[in-house]
Amino acid sequence: MPPNLPPQTMQAMVLEAGGKPLKPTELPVPKPKADQILLKVLACGVCRTDLHIVDGELNQPKLPLVLGHEIVGRVEALGPVVKGFEIGERVGVPWLGFTDGTCPYCLSGRENLCDDPRFTGYQINGGYAAYTVADARYCFKLPDGYSDAEAAPLLCAGLIGYRCLKMAKDALSGDPVSGTKRLGIYGFGAAAHIVAQVAQAQGCKIYAFTSPGDIKAQDFARELGAVWAGGSDEAPPEKLDAAIIFAPVGALIPAGLRAVRKGGVVVCGGIHMSDIPSFPYDILWEERVVRSVANLTRNDAREFLALAPTIPVKTTVAPMRLSQANEALEALRQGKLTGAAVLIPDG
């Protein structure tokens, strides 16, 4: 343990049951196991996945549960077998919190599909608290140049957006005549505002789709360089090579298929989506593809956290106190956020 020991108890916002607001609770400060790091939470991003858990749409949470999987923390203590981290160092903790390392998916480099995974802020207590512990193997050193609040969205919104972009890579090879690469993004929130910057750095033109009439989000997309922004009920001015859907609305899959060219791909980046309505085969025909993205790998995290400062990716954040977690979730539910809400522990 470091010379300055952490307190015995801490404040946390706890989910006791789906469909109920988080409850301010005083909990014991967790003690790190042999392979864990104890972190003083500096910031924790608010993700739509958190909202799905609170609303009971993801039905396998550990209860009671401390949400939060975009954690920026300072190392306070190290388990005895932990290597590669130092007391006082700033690190990040993402959604993927544990994999078994022995299933066929882990052994083939697809640990995001592990048969026995555990996820931060879902089966493992997360960062809506003053302190948390995390398996050191799933923690990452963070790039300099980002404040604690600015770094938090990189750890899920950034990582999932990056993986989505990788899944669309083949379709984004570019027009054989003009070389133009056209990417549509449905749902212009935390993940979209990051991946749009990465995609533009890779030569893509961005077409942003928001809720119909959401002029604020459309203006935000244009500020970030989108060449077109409109409602999700509109057709883009030209066919897209690929589309990424972050909004949890199943009806956007047929819309995305109609928007992409022959051979285009529609990537679903969310962990939950409303039911997909039936659609005519002819909008899927001509080798269009629909695919989902599940979770992330540690390699995704290493690649993206190294890439982000070279672009450089700028995150737009709305810092709020930890005690305002319910208000932050409601603002996300109502579509009132520009960029990402980030919780800062009180004191």
Image: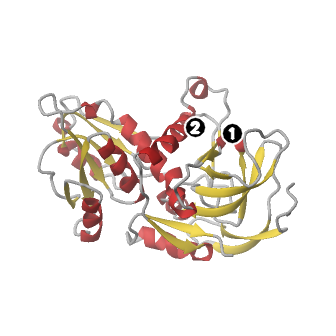
Task: In this rendered view, identify the residue nearer to me: 163 or 179.
Answer: 179
- The residue carrying pointer 2 sits among few (fewer than 14), some (14 to 19) or many (20 or more) residues within 10 Å by Cα, namely many
Instruction: Determine whether label 1 and label 2 are within 8 Å by CB.
Output: yes
Res. 248 visible in picture: no
Q: Which is more toward the observer, 261 or 76?
A: 76
Q: Quadrant of residue 80?
A: top right
Say if residue 194 shows up in the picture: yes
* The disc label shown at residue 48, or none: none
Where residue 108 sits: x, y (%)?
Answer: 56, 23
Amino acid type, residue under disc 1 in the picture: Arg
Asked if residue 276 lies left or right of residue 179, the reply is: right
Q: Quadrant of the image for the N terminus?
A: bottom right
Element under disc 2: helix
Q: Position of residue 241 (x, y in %)?
A: 22, 38
- The amino acid beneath tag 2 is Arg
Which of the pair 279/74 is nearer the observer? 74
Residue 125's place in the image compared with 322, above or below, is above
Q: Is residue 245 positioned above or below 48 on the image?
A: above
User: In the structure shown, which secondary structural element does the residue marked by tag 1 occupy?
Assistant: helix
At x 61%, y 34%, the residue is 115
User: At x 83% / y 55%, what residue is drawn?
Assistant: 31
Q: Which residue is mark 1?
A: 137
Percent position of residue 214, x then y: 26, 69
**Quadrant of the rendered image containing residue 96:** top right
How has the structure been colored for display? secondary structure
Q: How many tags in the picture?
A: 2
Q: Above or below — where is 116 with respect to 191?
A: above
Label 1 crowding class (10 Å Cα cut-off): few <14, some 14-19, many 20+? some
Task: Give the residue displayed 64% in from the left and 65% down from the top.
Answer: 128
Name which of mark 1 and mark 2 comes first in the sequence. Answer: 1
Q: Which residue corresponds to the image point at 63% horizontal and 27% vertical from the top-left? A: 103
Residue picked out by circle 2: 298
